[in-house]
Amino acid sequence: MGSAKACSHPNAYKFSIKKFNKAKSTGLHHNVSPPLQSFASELVGLFVCKARAAKQFKKSKKIKDSFHRILSPHVMAAFKHCAAVTQEKMASPLDFNPDLPHYWSSHPRDTIFGALTDFFFSPFSGFSIYHPIYDDDIMHLTLRHAIYSAINSPHDIPTAIFMLPCWGRSKSTNAYMALYNQFNHMCSLVGTIKSQKPSLR
């Protein structure tokens, strides 16, 4: 668990249009409502949707700022190499990591950019990394979903890696840490990346 760097991938536009075109070629653009107009119009829609979502948390600067934070590429590369991560949850077409084969978004329309959606409605599987926005309720819900997916898995236990904030408080006061403490026989606190060193390698 740790912090993330405030940045955007330098090739985000290129990766988004690549995903858009691939989704189109595989038929994911069929029967979308309202109908697609163009890549440019859909890209604008992504920014509008993101701005509207951030406005819901206008009283908290930290939560609003988290909409503009992504995990540094070298952090993602390390988890992919060392922990076999293949899925990024809580991502979007604007900030997904292109080095992972799958990413999940909370917005159904993002399927036109190749995203998988609605992961809360089914147990997760495989090896995933989560970097949710810094809202206590959302972080708690996400961790709970991962834990109960593991408890109810009939096959090999899936693995989820969370990158979550501490914000300088005692970690035991965070809602998700209370859940972690309850299920610490299933969870491991790997470490903390200080916000002053977001490029820690």
Image (tube, rainbow, N blue to C red):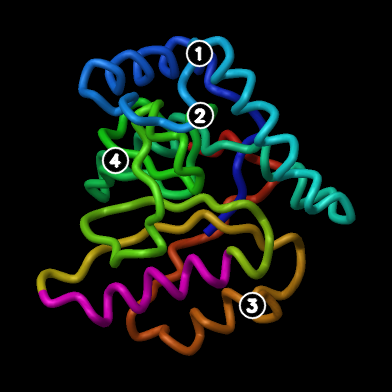
Rendered image: mark on residue 80? 4
* Residue at image mark 3: 175
Badge 3, how many Cα within 10 Å: few under 14, some, many 20+?
A: some
Q: Picture quarter containing residue 137?
A: bottom right
Q: Residue furthest bottom?
A: 182
Whether residues under marks 4 and 3 lie with C-beta atoms below 8 angstroms apart, the answer is no
Badge 1, how many Cα within 10 Å: few under 14, some, many 20+?
A: few
Residue drawn at x 30%, y 18% is 24
Between marks 4 and 3, how big is the CA–CA gap? 28 Å
* Residue at image mark 2: 34
Amino acid carrying label 4: it is Lys
Rendered image: mark on residue 160? none
Work out whether residue 195 or residue 101 is closer to the camera in this orientation and state it: 101
Amino acid carrying label 2: it is Pro
Q: Nearer the viewer, mark 2 or mark 4?
A: 2
Between marks 1 and 2, how big is the CA–CA gap? 9 Å
Range of magenta residues:
139-154
Dot 2 or dot 4: first in sequence order is: 2
5 lies left or right of 60: left
Q: Nearer the viewer, mark 1 or mark 3?
A: 1
